[in-house]
Image (tube, rainbow, N blue to C red):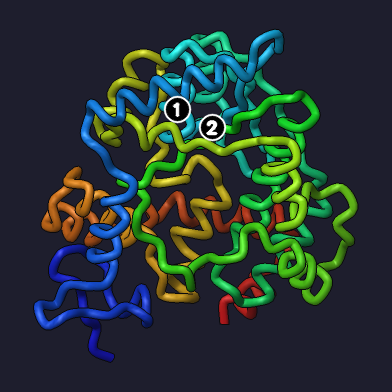
């Protein structure tokens, strides 16, 4: 099969069969970035003014309350840098960590170091493992490429639930347009679609989801319009360079890098580094690196060179494979059947 690759990025027809190219070999993602950038990217002066206004609103909404916002922490670069900046801006966040049973030791240490140094309170939600195991296995057996929706959905639902309980009006996430602008819909879609998630578990799972945090479009509407809870992507209103951010975190917070985007989770590392490329031909690095190219934080040549590196160090892959299969209760034969 002939593989076509974009002349501006590293997205190709293997990663996304729905990709399209113009006569110059430039893919649709480049033009989508340019269009969205007109609405989402501003000059430094405009960003500074909008950031000041947003921070003031958040502070006013939190008067008389213990916290004025919620942030999520995973030990990764985005959430850690967000915690650092939120504190620098004088906000009073409650940090929430969703423990789905897959934390790496390094991620846990990063969270501990960060919150201790920044003096931020932490609430950790520990998922019911049998339920969550059922749901993760269900997504694996369903052969859809969006196997991390179970975690993403629960985090989203949990943040709104806690915000409503504590009267907090703002959830600040670590999303950033410039570094996350490329993501094919066919890779992962339906994070808020509880009906879809529940159906996958009913069809392919083993346990009912009795305690799993959920949110529907209707409930989301109630949280946002009824309770006035807003999600703010604060990193969009400031300069956010991944490499520079990591250096700051290493220096200021004793933070340590974990080897890849979202690789602070062992399951994410195994899913993105092995299952997606082997089963679906999806290498998420192509989307992440293309975003950085469009943002001017990396050259196409640097991205191509990085893609020549294996998605997984061989020894670590062996360790993770044994660990993941054992934790999920899968035999080698069962896992190979899933992969086929």
Check disc 1 and report its element: helix, strand or loop.
Answer: helix
Q: Quick check: 99 above or below 252?
A: below
Quadrant assignment, res 34: bottom left
Identify the residue at image location x=66%, y=52%: 153
Q: Is residue 27 above or below residue 233?
A: below
Q: Which mark is residue 82?
A: 1
Q: Residue at x 39, y 42 (%)?
A: 176
Q: Nearer the viewer, residue 14 or 316?
A: 14
Quadrant position of the C terminus in the picture:
bottom right
Label ID, residue 172: 2
Q: CA distance from mark 1 to mark 2?
A: 8 Å
Tag 1–tag 2 contact (CB < 8 Å):
yes
Asked if one can make out residue 263 in the rendered structure from this viewpoint, the answer is: yes
Q: Position of residue 75 (x, y in %)?
A: 51, 31
Q: Name the quadrant containing residue 140.
A: bottom right
- Would residue 31 be found to the left or right of residue 64 on screen? left
Q: Is residue 61 left or right of residue 249?
A: right
Mark 1 or mark 2: which comes first in sequence? 1
Residue at 82% in and 54% down: 131
Viewer-side label of 1, 2? 2
């Amino acid at each position: 099969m002939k593989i076509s690759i974009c002349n501006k990025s590293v997205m190709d027809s293997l990663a996304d069969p729905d990709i399209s190219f113009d006569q110059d070999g430039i893919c649709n993602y480049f033009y989508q970035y340019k269009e969205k950038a007109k609405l989402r990217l501003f000059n430094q002066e405009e960003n500074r003014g909008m950031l000041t206004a947003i921070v003031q609103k958040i502070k006013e909404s939190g008067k008389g309350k213990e916290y004025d916002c919620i942030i999520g922490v995973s030990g990764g670069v985005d959430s850690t840098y967000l915690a650092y900046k939120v504190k620098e801006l004088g906000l009073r966040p409650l940090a929430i960590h969703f423990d789905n049973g897959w934390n790496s030791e390094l991620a846990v240490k990063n969270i501990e170091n960060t919150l201790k140094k920044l003096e931020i309170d932490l609430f950790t939600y520990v998922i019911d493992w049998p339920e969550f195991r059922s749901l993760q296995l269900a997504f694996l057996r369903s052969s859809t490429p969006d196997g991390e929706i179970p975690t993403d959905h629960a985090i989203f639902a949990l943040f709104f639930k806690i915000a409503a309980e504590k009267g907090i009006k703002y959830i600040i996430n670590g999303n950033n347009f410039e570094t996350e602008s490329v993501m094919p819909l066919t890779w992962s879609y339906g994070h808020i679609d509880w009906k879809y998630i529940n159906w996958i578990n009913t069809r392919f799972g083993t346990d009912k989801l009795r305690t799993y945090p959920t949110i529907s479009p209707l409930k989301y509407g109630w949280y946002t319009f009824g309770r006035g809870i807003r999600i703010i992507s604060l990193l969009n209103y400031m300069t956010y360079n991944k490499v520079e951010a990591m250096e700051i975190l290493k220096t200021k917070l004793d933070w340590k890098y974990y080897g890849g985007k979202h690789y602070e989770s062992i399951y994410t590392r195994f899913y993105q580094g092995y299952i997606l490329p082997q089963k679906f031909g999806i290498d998420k690095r192509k989307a992440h690196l293309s975003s950085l190219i469009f943002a001017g934080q990396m050259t196409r040549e640097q991205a191509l060179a990085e893609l020549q590196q294996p998605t997984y160090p061989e020894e670590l892959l062996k360790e993770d494979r044994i660990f993941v299969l054992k934790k999920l209760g899968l035999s080698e034969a069962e896992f190979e059947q899933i992969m086929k």
